[in-house]
Structures are given as C-alpha cells and as structure tokens.
Amino acid sequence: MLNYKIYSHNFQLGFQKALSPNMEGIVNVHYDILTAMIGVLILVGYLLTRSIYLFNSTSKIKSREIIHHDQVILEVTWTILPIIILFIIGVPSIALLYASNELVETSLTIKVIGNQWYWTYEYSDLDLMFDSYMVAEEDLNHGELRLLEVDHRLILPSLTHVKVLMTSADVIHSWAIPSLGIKIDACPGRINSITMFMKKVGIYYGQCSEICGVNHGFMPIVVQAVNELQYVDWVNSVLKNQ
C-alpha cells in the first residue's frame, strides 16, 4: 500500500519524527526543559569558573564575609530564580500529563495481548483476531528491516482516534511505538488503555520495552496506518476470507 516507514536509524541520537499530537507535545516539553537545563549549566559553570580563576592558590584576592541580612537582592534572586525555573519546567510537564490522559471519543477499539514472545491483536468491533510474530532474518525480503518486520501488521486508519486496550497472557510486556509517543504496559490480569492518533499514512515500528524473557528483543510491533478508504477495503477483504 505504501513505502513510508518510521523507525530508528543507525547512530540516531534524537527522537524519531513526531507523528502524533502526544509525541509532538513530548518533544516540545523536552526542548523546553533542555533549554532551562542549559541555562542553569551556563550560570553554574560561569560562577564556578570565575571562582576558580579569582580564588586559586596564586591569587592575591581575598574573599570577604557576606552578611546575609544586608544582601536583600541576593536573597531574593536565589529564591525567585529557582521558582521561575521550576515553573518553566513544571507547567508544560503537567499540562502534557493531563493532555495525554484526556478522554476523547474514539471510532475504533483495538485489544492488544502480550505473549511470550509475540503480540495478539483483536478488533473488537469486527470479531477479528490474529497473532503477530517477528519475521526471521532468512525470510526477509529486500528492503525489509531486520528484527522489526512481522508476519501480520496491525492495520489502522490514519487521522482517526483509536482506543487501545492492553493486557498480557503471561508476564509483563510493554507496547511501545516511539514516533507516536506511546509506551503502555501489558500486565496479566489487568487492562490498561490509551488513545492513539496517527497524523500520516505510513508504517510505524516499535518493540516490546519491558524485559519479558529470553526472546524479549524479538517482539517487534508494526502498525500500518492507511487512509479510510484503504482501511475499509482491507476490512472487507479480511472478513471475506474468514
């Protein structure tokens, strides 16, 4: 259907491309916090360097005692400045936290079940269920990704709010897709939920992110986002072949 793939590349240091509102928020908050951290680093580095330069063993400059109750500006500055920094960090973080848990009306519900060592996907509205295993290296076609391809992809419509219900049949797993800002634990005997929204048609890759046994590294996740017409055609073809 398409060739647009989103995955981590060799020597990549930053985030994957943000292709959901949640991931865009995570990236923006990251940059806000990073900016504040760089500012603190520069300030502390400047004060430390200046102190080392002025008050080393060969310096003839002598420090003088500061009487705190006479230094109102200093007292106010080192009280107000940390508050401002924490405010810059805290407000966007809390806003993102609440936004990620916002209840929205969804058009589709998917149930994901973690197993050792594969995923089971259930389309609750369609009475459709299938397992998704990693494709062995010797079975890969040209251009496919080692340790990331699966035999059955999770097909979902783009530009649609999808509710994902998550659980496990054995041990704790974690269903994670970095480009969508999704990481949700699959716990046996418990159902967790999250809402996902894909802004672009494409193939999104992820992996299990909770150590779950000897084959933990061989539980890839592949979500293929298609447009609404392609999704309807896929559903009809699958139901016809059942």
Image (cartoon, grey):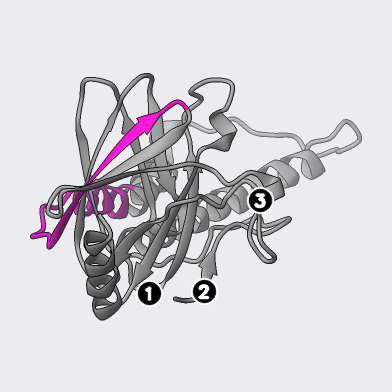
**Measured from the top left, where is residue 60 in percent x and y?**
85, 38
Q: Residue at x 54, y 49 (%)?
A: 40
Local crowd size for mark 1, using a 10 Å CA cut-off: few (<14), some (14–19), many (≥20): some
Judging by the rendered image, the residue that carries numbered circle 2 is: 4
Local crowd size for mark 3, using a 10 Å CA cut-off: few (<14), some (14–19), many (≥20): few
Judging by the rendered image, the residue that carries numbered circle 3 is: 139
Q: Earlier in the sequence, mark 3 or mark 2?
A: 2
Which label number is shown at residue 200? 1
Local crowd size for mark 2, using a 10 Å CA cut-off: few (<14), some (14–19), many (≥20): few
Q: Which residues are magenta?
A: 90-116
Q: Is residue 233 above or below residue 218?
A: below
Considering the image in quadrants, where does the N terminus appear?
bottom left
Q: Residue at x 49, y 55 (%)?
A: 205
Tell me, yes or no, whether the highlighted magenta stretch contains residue 201.
no
Q: Residue at x 57, y 27 (%)?
A: 215
Q: Give the quarter of the image for residue 47.
A: top right
**Measured from the top left, where is residue 30 in percent x and y?**
45, 55
Q: Earlier in the sequence, mark 2 or mark 1?
A: 2
In the image as oriented, which residue stretches furthest toward the right? 58
